[in-house]
Amino acid sequence: MADALEDDREAILSANAEDLEEAKGLSPAMLDRLMLTPERISDMARGIRALIPLDAPFGRCIGEYLRPNGLVITKMTVPLGAVGIIYESRPNVTSDAAALAVKSGNAVLLRTGKEAWKSANAIVTALRRALRTANCPEDLILLVEDRSRASAEEMMKAKGYLDLLIPRGGKALIRTCVEQATVPCIETGTGICHIYVDKAARTDMALSILDNAKTSRPSVCNAAEVLLVHRAIAESFLPLVWKRLVEQRREKGLSPVSLRCDERARAILPDSERASDTDFDTEFLDLILAVRVVDSLDGALMHIGAHSTGHSEAIVTEDESAAERFLSTVDAAAVYHNASTRFTDGGEFGLGCEMGISTQKLHARGPFGLEALVSYQYRIKGSGQIR
């Protein structure tokens, strides 16, 4: 499958160019998500190859015991069956999901956004050819051809046909699936990710982490959307943030980050924009950062508790006790001390590619890949026992 992606690179890029041409009205962030490059196709192939040395997650014995009546009970991992994925305009999800499904013994039904359909179709064509070459059923990977909303609604109601539904996209898509699906659904959350810079933070480290978390790829769910700064260092730290994210980016010919500040932060950065009531609850997926000054670690924890989507949250501090309190108190799938939220990713966690980032607590949480795509079954061997 990885080889087939690279062999079909030109066909995939050509299809992607058509998608991009038809999607000119989308925001720059959405166009970035949609765009494929030779490097991104190589990354997709690398993600598939990273799965090869990993053990298949199904067919494992995870417990065995003998009952007093002589029954031998074995608990085995088994594939889920047919997995449906509804996702928006990110062609790389197509190959990640397909590879994870095949490796975990499942079939996958892919339903991409209409803006990315040609790209996804070119990718699926390559992957299905690879399955045929490997003497596997090509229908392990299927792409929904109907690009209307009706096809997504049918998948949500396809109980008895699909064993699991995974929505990957914006808040509206995820909410619709969670509220309307009759198929069991995993909630992959939006990422309103916070960076809290504590009074005991190293300034150079905090700036580096913030810059990476916000600007390395602002259109993804693990990018930072909110900066919280302890009041004890706000006067000295916020001007450095302005210099790094606004002035230095302009000097380099890059788009500056738009800082949307609360009143206390604007008093320090008068040229910044005024934050609205909704900015601290918005996944911008763009070069926009909401900024708030907090009085204490408790203030940061209260803000995150009120506004977090449970994705990824980070504290920057040299105070180990503050860090431990943050890590043990914040209710999110991934919590960081002195590191960028951009690491919340299956590949970065050593899991290979991923189906998504789950922000729910049951079955799967955080980057979920192979291990989350199996269930378990009890197998009981007897010698004529009756109850």
Image (spheres, helix red, strand yellow):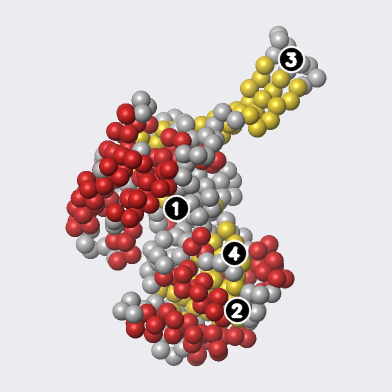
Q: Is residue 384 left or right of residue 56?
A: right
Instruction: Sort mark 1 into few (<14), some (14-19) or many (20+) by Cα contacts within 10 Å.
Output: some
Q: Which of labels 2 and 4 is toward the front?
A: 2
Q: Amino acid at mark 1?
A: Arg
Q: CA distance from mark 2 to mark 3?
A: 66 Å
Q: CA distance from mark 1 to mark 2?
A: 39 Å
Q: Disc 1 designates what residue? A: 175
Judged from the image, the secondary structure of the residue bearing numbered disc 2 is: loop
Picture residue at 41% right of the left edge, 61% below the top: 220
Q: Disc 2 designates what residue? A: 202
Q: CA distance from mark 4 to mark 3?
A: 52 Å
Q: CA distance from mark 4 to mark 1?
A: 27 Å
Q: CA distance from mark 2 to mark 4?
A: 15 Å
Q: Which mark is residue 387?
A: 3
Instruction: Sort mark 2 into few (<14), some (14-19) or many (20+) by Cα contacts within 10 Å.
Output: some
Q: Amino acid at mark 3?
A: Arg
Q: Is residue 216 left or right of residue 121?
A: right
Q: Is residue 207 left or right of residue 39?
A: right
Q: Is residue 346 left or right of residue 17?
A: right
Q: Based on the displayed image, in which of its 4 quarters is residue 375 positioned? A: top right
Q: Amino acid at mark 2?
A: Arg
Of the numbered discs 1 and 2, the one sitting upstream in the chain is 1
Q: State whether residue 100 is above or below residue 287.
A: above
Q: Which mark is residue 336?
A: 4
Judged from the image, the secondary structure of the residue bearing numbered disc 1 is: helix
